Amino acid sequence: MEVKSDVKNKTVIYNNGKEKIIKKGGTVAWRTNNPGNLSYGSLEGAVKDGAIGVYRYKTYKFGIFPDFETGEKALKNLWKNKWKNIMPERTVKEAMFIYSPPEDNNTSKYIDNINKKVDANKKIKDLNDNDFDNLFSVIKKQEGNGLGIEKREKVSHFGLKIDNEYKEFKDKPIEYDATGKIIPPRISINGSVNVKKHIRDGYNVNSYTRSLPNR
């Protein structure tokens, strides 16, 4: 899956080759499928947990996940596996100063909210499944999962008309430039017609009538 982000317009576009999923507005956590707002490439590193891109917001680099389930799984893995093994003796309160440092966040208020659900003085190694579930519910609410607008679009693919039969190249989605014009992929065609090199190498056909389908 390919992903593109536009921080200025608060948009993330996911492309799986069949459809584009466009998420606009809402919170960063919602747009990036990252309910814990995990950093990309740090102690919270989201790369190994399935992140497919990075969302650069101010001085932060948040991981972008292909779907909410993968992002949620990464959040749980951070606390229940990584941190439980790396720093089992630390309390939840101590860990929160790493997870949500006071120079960027109201960490004390964050901990107060956690204390309503879980004893923040508990060591990470002593948390049970219910404690973790309550902790994650507070984190997801605190980090913000406010919904924006989600739109889905079918991905069109480049094609040629060969001997009156239309051939679509499934691995070549149609792309557009800034003016809305189609950017043709590079396809080389062997045959009686000499096709310019603005078409992608790798496909062999006998003849063609046009390089792009009517739209």
Image (cartoon, rainbow, N blue to C red):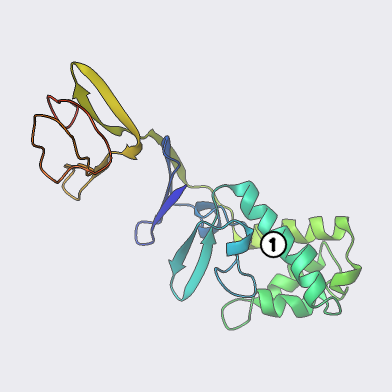
- Mark yes or no: residue 135 visible: yes
Q: Residue furthest bottom?
A: 103
Residue 42 x, y percent position in the rendering: 59, 75
> Residue at 86% of width from left, 76% of height from top?
121
Image quadrant assignment for residue 102: bottom right
Quick check: 116 left or right of 48?
Answer: right
Q: Which residue is mark 1?
A: 139
In the displayed structure, would residue 20 be above or below residue 44? above
Disc tally is 1
Q: Specify whether residue 138 is in view.
A: no
Give percent across and percent down for residue 56.
44, 68
Residue at coordinates 60% horizontally, 48% vertically from top-left? Answer: 68
Check the image and report above or below for 15 versus 31. above
Name the side, left or right, on which 196 lies relative to 96: left
Residue 119 quadrant: bottom right
**Farthest front residue in view:** 191
